[in-house]
Image (tube, grey):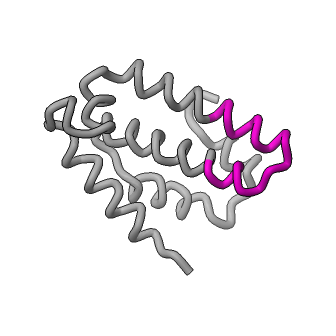
């Protein structure tokens, strides 16, 4: 089984790209373009994930979800967050009804 360590390593790599020259990597170019460019990519990848699912193409679904997760992690890094922040939130929610968890959130 693949562990969450791959997410941690990816998070570290993304952090290291924050100050890099835009031409040095795809991620550095996204950081240079700013949050709107990152959000646009998340929207594109989410749409592509939906379309892959509608096509019932399992491999395409996996690849598009990987792209969606990747760009979501870029957004996390933009905000100084990482995969451990999301994993901690999922751990907090474990064993709690989704209805109860959502109702307990502030400002619902």
Q: What type of secondary structure mainly makes up the magenta span?
A: helix
Q: Is residue 9 left or right of residue 98?
A: left
Q: Residue at x 47, y 41 (%)?
A: 72
Q: Is residue 19 left or right of residue 84?
A: left
Q: Residue at x 74, y 36 (%)?
A: 50
- Which quarter of the picture shows residue 64? top right
- Which quarter of the picture shows residue 74? top left
Q: Residue at x 52, y 76 (%)?
A: 2
Residue 40, position as x, y percentages in the image: 50, 22
Name the one closer to the observer, 89 or 65.
65
Q: Residue at x 73, y 51 (%)?
A: 98
Name the one closer to the observer, 101 or 68.
68
Magenta residues, as a range?
46-63
- The quarter of the rendered structure image containing the C terminus is top right
Residue 89, position as x, y percentages in the image: 50, 55
Q: Is residue 36 left or right of residue 50?
A: left
């Amino acid at each position: 089984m693949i562990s969450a360590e791959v997410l941690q390593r990816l998070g570290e790599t993304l952090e290291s790209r924050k100050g890099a020259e835009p031409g040095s990597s795809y991620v550095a170019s996204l950081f240079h373009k700013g949050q709107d460019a990152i959000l646009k990519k998340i929207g594109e990848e989410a749409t592509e994930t939906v379309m892959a699912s509608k096509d019932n193409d399992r491999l395409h679904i996996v690849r598009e979800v990987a792209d969606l997760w990747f760009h979501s992690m870029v957004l996390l890094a933009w905000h100084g967050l990482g995969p451990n922040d999301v994993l901690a939130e999922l751990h907090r929610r474990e064993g709690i009804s989704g209805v109860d968890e959502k109702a307990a959130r502030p400002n619902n």
